[in-house]
Image (cartoon, rainbow, N blue to C red):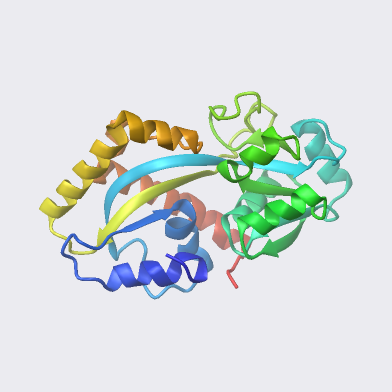
Amino acid sequence: MGGAGGVTGIGRVARAEPDGYTISVGTWGTHVVNAFVYSTPYDLAQDFETVALLPSVPHWFIARKNLPPKDFKEFIAYLKENSGKVTAASVGAGGSSAVCGYYFGKATGTSTTLVPYRGGAPALQDIVAGNVDTMCDLAANSLAQVKAGNVKAYAVTAKKRWFAAPDVPTVAEAGVPGVEVINWLGAYAPKGTPKDAIVRLNAAFKTAMADPAVRQRIADQGLEIPPPEQQTPEAFAAYLKSEMDKWGAVIRESGIKGQ
């Protein structure tokens, strides 16, 4: 699904024959954020059938290991004292990290200087090297570096602590309620795919996510499987709409655009 943050691949699925044999598996970034930061050749809200909500992982705020703040409250105070001077890495100018950073900045009255990168790996590499200060990163992306002590993790953007790093508090615990940024995955089919094909595809995904070996493999990567009642096409459609409504308002207000 490479190209323009996934736009190229998703566009091919949107134009595919709706026969149940071509599907798209995408993230919150590709199937929500992209709808508002890019001029896509498809309508993410209208051109797809929801198939199944898949595993998710939160974002978290990380920083170079020698950044002065010891915890998240100190981090917020540091950002306020150094408004606009702290550098924040992002995957692209309109990626999920940029959206998360704006959302957090509005909630806390802070601002940073965005430093766009071509991918999560080089962004993280520069934080490890101390060339950039912080990032609202996909937690699974930087877990190994946090465990190795090469970067700090201040807080997780979720309702509850992340099972893969239970010692890291949530943003709400650290004094900023409501800042929740979850990078979930989902499966989609082209609009008009027969209902019976959607049902069969959904059943296949649910069966896979119920398999003990698959569940362990997913957990090993830091992802969490949604409850069965949230995996249905109907439940996923409702969740997708709520996410589109929430993040559409945030991104339109921010003026963030992809490049």
Residue 117 in the figure: left or right of residue 128: left
Q: Residue furthest top?
A: 167
Vertical relation: 170 (above or below) 42: above
Residue found at x 25% / y 38%: 206
Task: Find residue 213 and report its horizontal and vertical position in percent.
Answer: 34, 32
Where residue 121 sits, quadrant-wise, is: bottom right
Instruction: Between residue 73 and residue 71, name the one nearer to us.
Output: 71
Task: Find residue 224 and report its horizontal and vertical position in percent.
Answer: 44, 34
Instruction: Between residue 116 and residue 99, name the one nearer to us.
Output: 116
| Figure quadrant of the N terminus | bottom left
| Figure quadrant of the C terminus | bottom right
Residue found at x 65% / y 27%: 169
The answer to whether residue 97 shows anywhere in this view is yes
Residue found at x 54% / y 40%: 58
Count numbered badges in the picture: 0
Instruction: Between residue 113 and residue 129, name the one nearer to us.
Output: 129
Vertical relation: 73 (above or below) 150: above
Instruction: Between residue 12 and residue 121, name the one nearer to us.
Output: 121
The answer to whether residue 133 shows anywhere in this view is no
Residue 159 in the figure: left or right of residue 156: left
Residue found at x 72% / y 53%: 125
Task: Find residue 196 and report its horizontal and vertical position in percent.
Answer: 11, 51
Vertical relation: 8 (above or below) 85: below
